[in-house]
Structures are given as structure tokens and as C-alpha cells.
């Protein structure tokens, strides 16, 4: 077992694990929780593999004390989890539901008692269905509701939570949820989904302001980022790569880091962006959260979109089929530094990990994590200010459209009995944390 993985990081470098509410909690009708778009979507036949739903997921809502124990044993510094908006506001607006807030209050206390820093994400895709019924993130009003919700949560937890994530991966929520329809809410608007980008970002800005106004600590957004390479040196493919990069990465990084949109996308947002919006979005970004899984290779295409992705050959792939390229994380981080320079705040890798087969022997995951940690360490040596790294995920969970078929956990879950069994990668990370 390699245990050198966590040596050579700066003092105070945070190592944690990451999860999300709908993927682990279950208990979807308890203590006043309202329905979310993921309840609706998962219960619509044909949407999720094998008809799986998050109704029970890992039953974390009832077993959170076990999961706190697993994290304490593991020895992580921090835990990134998400707060289910429909638990806090079952209809997405108005008075908070005490039962919902109580759950996160207990969770935060439990973390602090065990010396684990809580890092909540306010929105990891489980929008209250009542807001979707009013247009979801296509409706500008949702951004204001999100700001109000953030204020309620900060009022309750802000005395103990000192670092917050507003949104998880707004690109994925927009693309899969609103452009292609492979995630909730299942819309297929293609380029007409673009306002969803801006409304989420405005929501980020309003939530960040609410947190800062309450003196509740630092705020960041988590963006899914991928280094993009062209499939060939042809001009068409080179242009396709630039366009893909603008949609996937710059559409969400430029506004928070520079207060602008990539030029040609700005045209598509005319009439959507209002006075002061960009100032609000740019105002409070103490750090940047990055989720990295793999690089993307693209070539020119003719269709609704001017690009298409092509497989990256010659590298191992995860159970999901995602290419394993640790160097891509180094390239991404040094690339961000080159692009944004002094505008780049400290970075946290808020998700990185891989899905594997069902078993407990997961040398594949150990190698994956080891390689990516090494890539982060090299980026730090090369001058990028990376402050932390969170493994996706603590435990196997509901992997969205793939249901329970993709296992990302350091801990194996038996989805019939909810038994939790640490995998080899859990033991490996535990040793590495002890040996720091
Ligand atoms: C990310 C999501 C996370 C998980 C991983 C595998 O895009 O943020 O919830 O599904 O992918």
C-alpha cells in the first residue's frame, strides 16, 4: 500500500470526502420534506436506469451517526455534504421547515464533535418541485428564492459553518437537466437552456451575499471543469475545442472570477442579464471549488451544437467508461492559473474519484486517487494555490441517471440491508491520513 500520497502537501491542506443529499439521504417524505425535481424525475418510467430512485438511497437520514463514525475512523479533516432545499423549504419559498433544518443542525454538531469541518453545498440539483412548476432555473425569480433559502440556512448554521458552497456544477445541471434532458427536470431545450446558466449564477451571487451579510464565513461555487483538447490540428477542430471550453468551463468561471461572460456567449444572454447582475455574481468568491473527473477531446460537428466529444484512447477507463488522466488535473489547475492570474482565488478540489465494480478490492480506486493527489501536489509546486481535496465519494450512492449501477464509494453499500463496508481504498486513505 502506498501511503506517501499525502506527504509533501502544505500544512493545513484539507482532505475530505464528499456526498450529496438526494444521492444518500433517502427519507424523502419525512419531517416535512417536500418533493424535489429528482423525486419526480426518478419516478418517471424510463428516466433512471433500472427504475432506481432516491427514495431510500443509503438511508443516511436515519444512519447519519454511523456515517459520522465512518468519517471519524477514516480521519478526514472535512466533510462536504449538501443541504436539500426541499427539506428546508418544502415549497421552495417562505418560512423554514423546522424538521428539515434540525437534521442539518444535528449533522453539523456531530461533525464538529468529531473534529470534522462541515462544508455544506446549498444546491446539489434537488430543486423543490414547486419551483420547477414555476419554470425552475429558467425563471429569474428562482435566483431570488435561492438567496432567501441561503439566508435561512446561514441563520441557523452560520455560527458553526464557516465555509460554504452555493451551487454544485451549474454546467451539468444546465446541460443534462435543461439542454439534453438526461437529468431532472428532463427538459430538452438545447441552446435555449442558456438562461439557466445566468439564473444559477445570479442565485450564486445572491446566496453568497446573504451568507456574507450574516458574517457566516467564506463562500465559493463548485464548477465542473475539464481541460479540453481538439481531436486534430484542423482549424475546425481547434475552433470546436475553443467553443466547448467556453460552454463548459468559461461560461461559469469567467463570471465569478472576472464578472464577464465569454464574448460569443454574451450575445446569447442579451436581454437575460440585467444591470448589476454581473457585479453581484463577481462580488463574493473567497475560493473556487473544482470538480474534476476527466479531460475532454472534441471535434467539429454539424448539428444543434458545433462540437462533439470523441473518446480518449490509450488510457484506462472507469466502470463508467470515463478516461483516467491524472495529468489532466494538473493541466486544468495550471491552466486556470495561466488564464485568470491574480483573479484566481484559492482552489478546493471538491470532487474527484471513480466508479468501480461492486467488490471491496479496489486497487483501481487507490491508483486513481493516488495519481490525482500527485497531480494536485505538482500543481501546488508549480504555484497554484490549492487548499484542499475531497474524494467523491464517502460511500456508494444514487448516481443520478445511472441509478445504483455506478459505485464511487470508499465505503461499499449493500442497498438492500444498507450495510456499510469499508473498501481497501478506505483503509488506504486512512493510513495515508495517519501518516501525514
Ligand atoms: C458529479 C456530481 C456528483 C457525482 C459525480 C460522479 O458530476 O456532482 O453528484 O454524481 O459526478
Image (tube, rainbow, N blue to C red):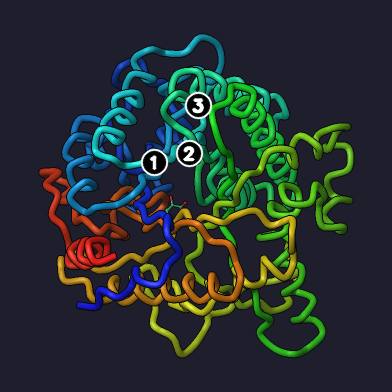
Quadrant of residue 20 in the image?
top left
Q: Looking at the image, which residue is at 64% across and 36% down?
A: 204
What residue would you read off at disc 2? 121
Q: Looking at the image, which residue is at 74% across and 90% down?
A: 233
Element under disc 2: strand
58 relative position to 421: left or right? right
Say which of marks 3 and 1 sits in front. Answer: 1
Say which of marks 2 and 3 sits in front. Answer: 2
Dot 2 or dot 3, earlier in sequence: 2
Q: Residues within 10 Å of mark 3 (few under 14, many from 20)?
A: many
Dot 1 or dot 2, earlier in sequence: 1
Q: Residues within 10 Å of mark 2 (few under 14, many from 20)?
A: many
Marks counted in the figure total 3
169 relative position to 114: left or right? right
Q: Residues within 10 Å of mark 1 (few under 14, many from 20)?
A: many
Element under disc 1: strand
Spatial CA distance of label 1 from label 2 is: 6 Å
79 relative position to 302: left or right? left
* Percent position of residue 240, x then y: 75, 74
Cβ atoms at labels 1 and 2 below 8 Å apart: yes
Q: Looking at the image, which residue is at 34% across and 23% down?
A: 105
Quadrant of residue 228 in the image?
bottom right
Instruction: Give the residue furthest to the front.
Output: 11
Q: Is residue 362 visible?
A: yes
What residue would you read off at disc 3? 128
Spatial CA distance of label 2 from label 3 is: 15 Å
Element under disc 3: loop
Instruction: Give the residue furthest to the top.
Output: 95
What residue would you read off at disc 1? 81
Q: In the image shown, does 173 or 364 lie closer to the viewer?
A: 364
Dot 3 or dot 1, earlier in sequence: 1
Ligand 1: which quarter? Answer: bottom left
Amino acid at each position: 500500500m502506498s501511503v506517501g500520497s499525502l506527504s509533501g502537501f502544505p500544512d493545513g491542506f484539507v482532505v475530505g470526502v464528499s456526498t450529496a443529499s438526494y444521492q444518500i439521504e433517502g427519507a424523502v417524505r419525512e419531517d416535512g420534506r417536500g418533493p424535489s425535481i429528482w423525486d419526480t424525475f426518478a419516478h418517471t418510467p424510463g428516466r433512471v436506469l433500472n427504475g432506481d430512485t432516491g427514495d431510500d438511497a443509503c438511508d443516511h437520514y436515519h444512519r447519519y451517526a454511523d456515517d459520522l463514525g465512518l468519517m471519524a475512523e477514516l480521519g478526514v479533516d472535512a466533510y462536504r455534504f449538501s443541504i436539500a432545499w426541499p427539506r428546508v423549504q418544502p415549497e421552495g419559498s417562505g418560512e423554514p421547515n423546522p424538521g428539515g433544518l434540525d437534521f442539518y443542525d444535528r449533522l453539523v454538531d456531530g461533525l464538529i464533535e468529531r473534529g470534522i469541518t462541515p462544508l455544506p453545498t446549498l444546491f446539489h440539483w434537488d430543486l423543490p418541485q414547486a419551483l420547477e412548476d414555476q419554470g425552475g432555473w429558467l425563471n429569474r425569480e428562482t435566483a431570488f428564492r435561492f438567496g432567501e433559502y441561503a439566508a435561512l440556512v446561514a441563520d441557523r448554521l452560520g455560527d458553526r459553518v464557516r465555509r460554504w458552497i452555493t451551487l454544485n456544477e451549474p454546467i451539468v445541471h444546465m446541460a443534462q437537466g435543461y439542454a439534453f434532458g438526461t437529468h431532472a427536470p428532463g427538459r430538452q431545450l438545447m441552446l435555449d437552456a442558456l438562461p439557466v446558466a445566468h439564473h444559477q449564477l445570479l442565485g450564486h451571487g445572491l446566496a453568497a451575499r446573504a451568507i456574507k451579510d450574516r458574517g457566516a464565513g467564506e463562500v465559493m461555487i463548485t464548477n465542473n471543469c475539464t481541460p479540453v483538447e481538439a481531436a486534430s490540428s484542423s482549424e475546425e477542430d481547434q475552433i470546436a475545442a475553443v467553443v466547448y471550453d467556453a460552454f463548459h468551463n468559461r461560461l461559469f468561471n469567467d463570471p465569478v472570477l472576472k464578472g464577464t461572460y465569454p464574448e460569443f456567449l454574451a450575445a446569447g444572454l442579451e436581454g437575460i442579464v440585467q444591470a448589476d447582475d454581473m457585479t453581484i455574481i463577481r462580488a463574493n468568491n473567497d475560493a473556487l471549488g473544482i470538480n474534476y473527473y476527466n479531460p475532454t477531446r472534441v471535434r467539429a460537428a454539424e448539428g444543434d451544437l458545433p462540437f462533439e466529444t470523441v473518446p480518449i484512447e490509450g488510457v484506462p477507463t472507469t466502470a463508467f467508461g470515463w478516461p483516467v488522466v491524472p495529468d489532466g488535473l494538473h493541466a486544468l489547475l495550471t491552466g486556470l492559473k495561466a488564464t485568470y492570474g491574480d483573479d484566481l482565488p484559492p482552489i478546493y478540489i471538491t470532487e474527484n474519484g471513480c466508479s468501480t465494480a461492486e467488490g471491496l478490492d479496489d486497487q483501481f480506486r487507490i491508483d486513481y486517487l493516488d495519481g490525482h493527489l500527485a497531480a494536485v501536489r505538482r500543481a501546488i509546486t508549480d504555484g497554484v494555490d490549492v487548499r484542499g481535496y475531497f474524494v467523491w465519494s464517502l460511500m456508494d450512492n444514487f448516481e443520478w441517471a445511472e441509478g445504483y449501477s455506478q459505485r464511487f464509494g470508499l465505503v461499499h453499500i449493500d442497498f438492500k440491508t444498507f450495510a456499510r463496508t469499508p473498501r481497501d481504498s478506505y483503509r488506504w486513505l486512512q493510513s495515508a491520513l495517519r501518516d501525514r
